[in-house]
Structure formats: C-alpha cells, structure tokens
Amino acid sequence: MRAPGLLALEVEEGVGSPCADLVVQLDGYQAAHAARWGSVETMGWTVRVRVFREDLVDGPGTLGGVTWWGDRVIDVYQHLPNVFPHDLHHVLYGQSSADHHGWCLQGFVLWEASVVGLDEQASLCGSDPSLALEAQAPQP
Ligand SMILES: [Zn+2]
C-alpha cells in the first residue's frame, strides 16, 4: 500500500493500527510539514511503521523514529506517528542533519511541539539554553 506523496508504506508484523489509518495519519503529518517547510522530495523513500520503540534511537534523547538515508527508509514507532515530520525534516536537509544542528534556531522544534504535539525541546535544544529561548520567539 502506498501513502500519498510517493512514499511506500510498510507495516511491521504486530503493529496494532490498520494500514488505512496509518496512511491517513502519516499523510496528515506530511501535509502539515509541507505547509510550513515546503514539500520534501520523497520519491523512492519507504516509511516503515515498527513495533518496538527501543530500536529507534536517532540521537541523544530522541527516541521513536530513525531516518536511513542510504536505504531511503524512515522508521517510525507505531505509537509515535507524530515523529514522522522529524524524519521528513531529516530527508529535507540530508544526512548532514543527523545532529539536528540548527533545528532550534530555525524554529523546527517549536513548530513540532505546537503543530504535531511532539516536544523535543529538552532533547534537541537542552544542551544550549539560548537555542531553546531562540526557538520560543514568534515565527514571522
Ligand atoms: Zn533526528
């Protein structure tokens, strides 16, 4: 089954949600991300909805999604579909975004918290309080 936006969708055995529901959820998050950050070239990418969260660590303090640039795969934990925009952001900015550099300054972290309800401020901005303060500034 294919999600809109030319992403292929794979659902791991044991995931509790029906495929059709996952498509609707992920499509909604992709549309929200595109509305703020522009469309992301996802041709050839696959989203895998995974059973276990512990497998999905993409950096200090971030848990629930992983972007595999080489294989063009995004792994998303089944009970944290709102991590998907985080990984679309990795696709948008490429492999050099693996350290999340600038995600506070550009306002992504604040946007993520307010629009998709995933608050990563502590994990992605916590090492530098000025970044978190910057992220709280209103968007133009
Ligand atoms: Zn990340």
Image: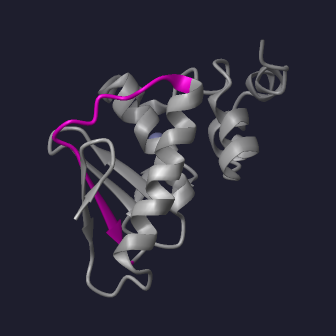
| Vertical side of 51 occupied by 132: above or below | above
- Give the magenta-colored segment's residue range: 37-51
Magenta stretch: residue 46 in it? yes
Side (left or right) of 105 relative to 26: right
In front of the other: 133 or 12? 12
In front of the other: 125 or 2? 2
Residue 108 x %, y %: 63, 30
Residue 50 x %, y %: 35, 71
Residue 92 x %, y %: 38, 27
User: Which residue is depicted at the point 78% across and 29% down?
Assistant: 132
User: Which residue is depicted at the point 63% across and 38% down?
Assistant: 124
Looking at the picture, the colour scheme in use is: one colour
Question: Can you tell which quarter of the image residue 96 is in?
Answer: top left
| Vertical side of 66 occupied by 15: above or below | below
Looking at the figure, which quarter contains the C terminus? top right
User: Which residue is depicted at the point 29% across and 28% down?
Assistant: 41
Magenta stretch: residue 23 in it? no
